[in-house]
Image: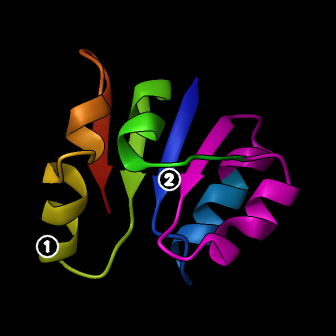
Amino acid sequence: MRVGFVGLGAMGRPMAENLLRAGFAVSVWARRPESAAPLVAAGALQSTGLAAMAAQCEVVVSMVTNSGDVEALLLADEGVLAGLRPGSVHVDM
């Protein structure tokens, strides 16, 4: 199972690291690519966009600041919902 992760701050990065340690395939997307660098070094796949990441994943987790940010990442033209496949799940933390 591949899990996508959006929001790699103080809470998101440790969650994504734990998924990697548990053996999950992890894709990440960050507004600031340097935020993803430690996860990519640990084996995560850095996605070029939200829709592209969602298309690869069975589960997409978002850990962002507020509901406005969640709405933006889901509903943008190339957002999560544009790529999420039928049967896949989005989890907002």
Q: Is residue 28 above or below residue 67?
A: above
- In the rendered view, does 70 fall on the left or right side of 25? left
Q: Residue at x 50, y 53 (%)?
A: 5
Viewer-nearest residue: 91 or 74? 74
* Residue at x 51% of width, y 66% of height: 30
Q: Position of residue 39 (x, y in %)?
A: 75, 60
* 65 within the magenta span: no
Front residue of 29 and 20: 29
Q: Residues within 10 Å of mark 2 (few under 14, many from 20)?
A: many
Q: Is residue 24 magenta?
A: yes
**Of residues 80 and 12, which is closer to you in this image?**
80
Residue 62: % across, % down: 36, 59
Q: Element at badge 2? A: strand
Residue range (magenta): 19-44
Q: CA distance from mark 1 to mark 2?
A: 16 Å
Residue 81, quarter of the rendered image = top left
Name the quarter where the C terminus is drawn. bottom left
Q: Residue at x 86, y 55 (%)?
A: 42
* Picture coordinates of residue 13, whole percent (x, y): 62, 70
Q: Label 1 belongs to which residue?
A: 67
**Kind of residue sitting beneath label 1:** Ser
The answer to whether the residue labelled 1 contacts the one labelled 2, judged by CB atoms less than 8 Å apart, is no
| Circle nearer the N terminus (1, 2) | 2
What is the crowding at mark 1: few (fewer than 14 residues within 10 Å), some, or many (at least 20)?
few
**Residue at 73 percent of width and 47 percent of height:** 44
| Residue of label 2 | 5
Q: Is residue 55 above or below residue 51?
A: above
